[in-house]
Amino acid sequence: MTESATDIAPRRKGLSRRRRRSLSRGAQYVVFAGVVVAFALAADWGRLRNQFAQADIAGDMFPDVITLALKNTVLYTVTGFVVGLALGIVIALMRLSSVGPYRWLAGLYIEVFRGLPALLIFIFIGVAIPLAFPGTEIVGGTYGKVALALGLVAAAYMAETIRAGIQAVPKGQLEAARSLGFSPARAMVSIIIPQAFRIILPPLTNELVLLFKDSSLVLFLGVTLEERELSKYGRDLASTTANSTPILVAGLCYLLVTVPLGFVVRRMEAKAQEAVK
């Protein structure tokens, strides 16, 4: 008895789709492992250890790398974030305003400060403002300049994030608040913005991570020994010791803050997705 077409069709297909995916995945693992092994065999670990892993140089950096450099970096980041958040809220509300000039001005600000490199903003704050207003000094000295520079850059990004969060809040929330006698301003402050912040908390935390790294641009403002942040501190010690170990230690201190913050962002995003489901 001859076999039907339906009986012999599965044998003509060869490997199943699941089997092909499994083989493809295995091949990728093999290639990745081969690249890692090749890199490990080709690298001169002795020279790398001598240049980047001198325990005595790393030990001499403590506790100053924590109590001075890391502390300044965190301070610059937090103050810049506060300035950026406050300004970002104002710009976001202007962007949503029914008054045309407010919307245009907010849109212009966002396009300009998102389009310019942060380095140029730091140079502008450190050089252009003193030239334009001789005899004046920004409150807080270097700390104030860094807070202003980081805040101006962060506000452009935060404003768009905040605007998106406000627009994501159901319009019925505002209508319900107005029916209870809330003024538009009070409804926005008491009802809409708090709900918007629960939505945009993950991207705002991610912006904090970016500001933490951008704080390294403070060196272009000219800082004293007591005002150095991690990047500047590591570079100065690397020049003094003619060794790159301080730069590695400074990088690890950055990761000490950014990795936990990144984990927090992922957890918040996961919770937000669960809430939506």
Image (tube, helix red, strand yellow):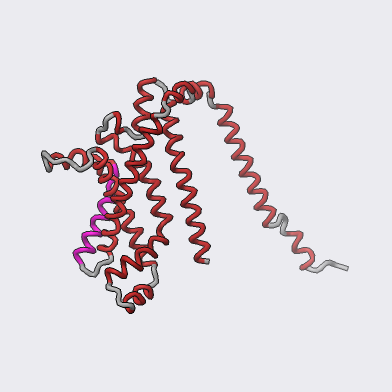
Residue drawn 37% across and 37% down? 71
Residue drawn where x is 38% and y is 75% of the image: 172
In the depicted view, which residue is nearer to us: 240 or 8? 240
Residue extending furthest left?
134
- Rendered location of residue 153, percent (x, y): 29, 49
What x and y, as percent, mark residue 102?
21, 63
| 132 w.r.t. 42: above or below | below
The quarter holding residue 58 reads top left
| Prevailing secondary structure of the magenta residues | helix
Task: Examine the rendered structure and indicate whether residue 181 appears above or below residue 109.
Answer: below
> Which residue is pictured at 28% across the width and 72% down the height?
184
Residue 11 at what x, y percent from top left? 76, 59
- Left/right of residue 237 with respect to residue 101 in the rendered view: right
* Residue at position x 57%, y 29% in the image: 40
Between 22 and 175, the residue placed more toward the observer is 175
On screen, residue 212 above or below 87: above
Residue 118: horizontal and vertical position, in percent? 29, 44
Q: Quadrant of residue 43?
A: top right
Is 141 positioned to the left or the right of 265 in the image? left
Farthest right residue in view: 1
The residue stretch that appears in magenta: 100-118
